[in-house]
């Protein structure tokens, strides 16, 4: 079987084929220049909508906690730790304070890295104690509550948290109250 000769067909329809090719080429150019960027923007916008939707879902999930915190801020906490009466220590007894703080930290489950009195940061009625501890946040919370219950502790000035490999470190600076009658000696 012999194939038909397409040359007369091509000569007759060549202007039409050229026009069709130009139209296809221009259509492709319009797509690349106009439609593709818009489609990219639509995709980017859809990604932003998905991210915002997840954020809204997270906010809705934490809404009860947020409302409870707002209520507590207005009404006060549901519970409060009793504040002990501050019992100042004498200048000689102040050197026992680091050992008491070390025991308190160890009982709470923290590793004591360092506890020391700061002779530079001493006032007439206070002496600063600094401690560095390592452990889990729950253990530090227990330690912090117990630290607040120590009668010679006047105030906690600073708490710093540092993430270290596989653990957390806590720096605590606090002031120990000194007896007034011994403060002038």
Image (spheres, rainbow, N blue to C red):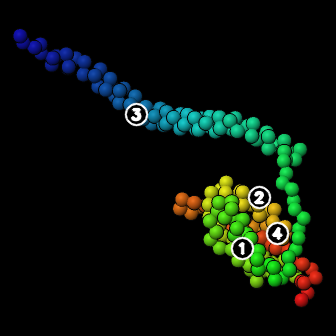
Q: Residues within 10 Å of mark 2 (few under 14, many from 20)?
A: few
Q: Which residue is drawn at the image coordinates 32% and 23% (left, top)?
A: 20
Contact, CB < 8 Å: mark 1 with mark 2? Answer: no
Tag of residue 145:
2
Front residue of 77/91: it is 91
Q: Give the spatial CA distance, label 1 vs label 3.
A: 80 Å
Which corner quadrant of the image does residue 173 belong to? Answer: bottom right
Q: Where residue 83 sits: x, y (%)?
A: 87, 59
Disc 1 is placed on an element classified as: helix
Asked if residue 4 can be seen in this view, the reply is yes
Q: Decide if residue 68 is on the left or right side of residue 25.
A: right
Say which residue label 3 marks.
29
SS at mark 3?
helix
Q: Nearer the viewer, residue 4 or 47?
A: 47
| Label 3–label 4 contact, CB within 8 A | no
Q: Residue at x 89, y 83 (%)?
A: 183
Q: CA distance from mark 4 to mark 1?
A: 13 Å
Task: Identify the mark at residue 99; answer none if there is no mark.
Answer: 1
In the image: residue 70, left or right of residue 106:
right
- Identify which residue, 36 or 132, lies in the foreground: 132
Query: What residue is disc 4 on?
Result: 153
- Looking at the rendered structure, the number of numbered marks drawn on it comes to 4
């Amino acid at each position: 079987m012999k194939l038909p000769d397409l040359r007369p067909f091509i000569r007759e329809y060549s202007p039409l084929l050229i026009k069709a090719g130009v139209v296809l080429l221009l259509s492709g150019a319009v797509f690349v220049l106009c439609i593709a960027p818009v489609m990219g923007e639509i995709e980017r916008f859809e990604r932003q909508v998905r991210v915002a939707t997840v954020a809204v879902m997270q906010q809705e999930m934490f809404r009860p906690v947020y409302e409870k915190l707002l209520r507590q801020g207005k009404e006060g906490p549901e519970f409060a730790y009793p504040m002990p009466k501050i019992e100042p220590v004498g200048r000689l007894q102040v050197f026992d304070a680091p050992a008491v703080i070390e025991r308190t930290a160890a009982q709470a489950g923290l590793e004591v890295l360092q506890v020391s009195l700061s002779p530079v940061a001493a006032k007439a009625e206070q002496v600063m104690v600094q401690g560095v501890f390592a452990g889990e946040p729950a253990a530090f919370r227990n330690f912090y509550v117990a630290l607040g219950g120590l009668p010679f502790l006047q105030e906690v000035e600073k708490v710093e948290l540092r993430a270290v490999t596989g653990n957390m470190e806590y720096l605590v600076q606090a002031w120990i109250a000194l007896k007034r009658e011994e403060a002038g000696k």
